[in-house]
Image (tube, helix red, strand yellow):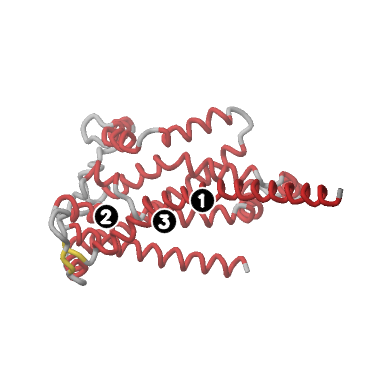
Amino acid sequence: MTTMTVQGSRRRKQGAFRRGVRRNLTAYGFLCGALICFAFFSWYPMVREILLSFQQTNFVDPPTWVGLENFRTVTEDSAFADAWINTAVFTGLALVFGYAVPFVAAIVLNELRHAKAYLRFVVYLPVMLPPAVGVLLFKWFYDPGPGLFNQILDLVHLPALSWLDSADTALISLVIVSTWMNLGTGTLIYLAALQSIPGELYEAAELDGAGLFKRVWHVTIPQTKLILLVMLLLQIVATMQVFIEPYLLTGGGPENATLTVAYLMYQYAFNFGDFGAGGALGLMLMLVLMVFSAFYLRISRDNQS
């Protein structure tokens, strides 16, 4: 009897051990799949770009190690400074419009009592369009002849503008396109954060006589501070890599007014065939974004502590 009890206990332990091994193997299998995807699509391109920035290659002959020569090539280019200045200005303008406008739109949508679902769909609709389609749509809007914007200016008896053909308006025109294309995503994220705020806070603020702006300042912004900080980081990282707007609308012109770092990188690699210089410029941009992200995370952690 005692022997049968011991054997039964041993079988139960073996069964539990097999089930645990089977369950852990499944988890490790999913983990390996994720690691392989990250390694192949994210980490390998980064390592390859770092190596490429110190090499001269045409991807046919064996690469040649050239040290810092690629960095010297891009920094001595007269377009190098223009690209960084334009990227910085574009990022600043995109923060003014692309960061504030979705937050204001989310607050307005959150305050509405009717047609909420319809307006959310309308706001999110541009995100559903392929980016190239949205950009080409604005190319027609900016057309100096039958373009929509100049027709609107004509209706209010204002002079037409050379939106994309003037160095004064070309960069801000790209900012408008970028803001319109990304408005829906930012608005929905802010809206989700707003709806997680307890209604009692707004009711208490209203009882204290707070108007809309005071409720936003003293309730909405403090309660959505984490989302605002995360979106600020994502916005800066995304806008500093702007490429598709200058590529499809202006080609970096006029007079390098819309030449960005990412577009100059493309020119080096695919127009000039200098993949090493393109890689060097990409490594510079990556280091700038890494330093900014580390500084941002340090400041955020200090504020939270």
| Left or right, residue 168 beside residue 217 | left
Q: Nearer the viewer, residue 296 or 198?
A: 296
Q: Mark 1, residues whose alpha carbon is within 10 Å: few (<14), some, or many (≥20)? A: few
Q: Earlier in the sequence, mark 2 or mark 1?
A: 1
Quick one: quadrant of the C terminus? bottom right
In this rendering, the label closer to the viewer, 1 or 3: 1
Q: Position of residue 264 (x, y in %)?
A: 22, 55
- How far apart marks 1 and 3 lie (CA) works out to 31 Å
Residue 109: x and y in percent read: 57, 37
Marks 2 and 1, Cα distance to the nearest angstrom? 38 Å
Mark 2: secondary structure = loop
For badge 1, the amino acid type reads Leu
Residue under label 3: 236
**Residue 11 percent across, percent down from the top left:** 73, 47
Counting residues from the N terminus, which is met first, the one under dot 2 or under dot 3? 3
Residue where numbered disc 1 is placed: 31
Q: Where is mark 2, residue-wise?
A: 260
Earlier along the polypeptide chain: callout 1 or callout 3?
Answer: 1
Instruction: Determine the residue located farthest toward the bottom in the rendered image.
Output: 67
Task: Check disc 3: other Cα within 10 Å, few if <14, some if 14-19, many if 20+.
Answer: many
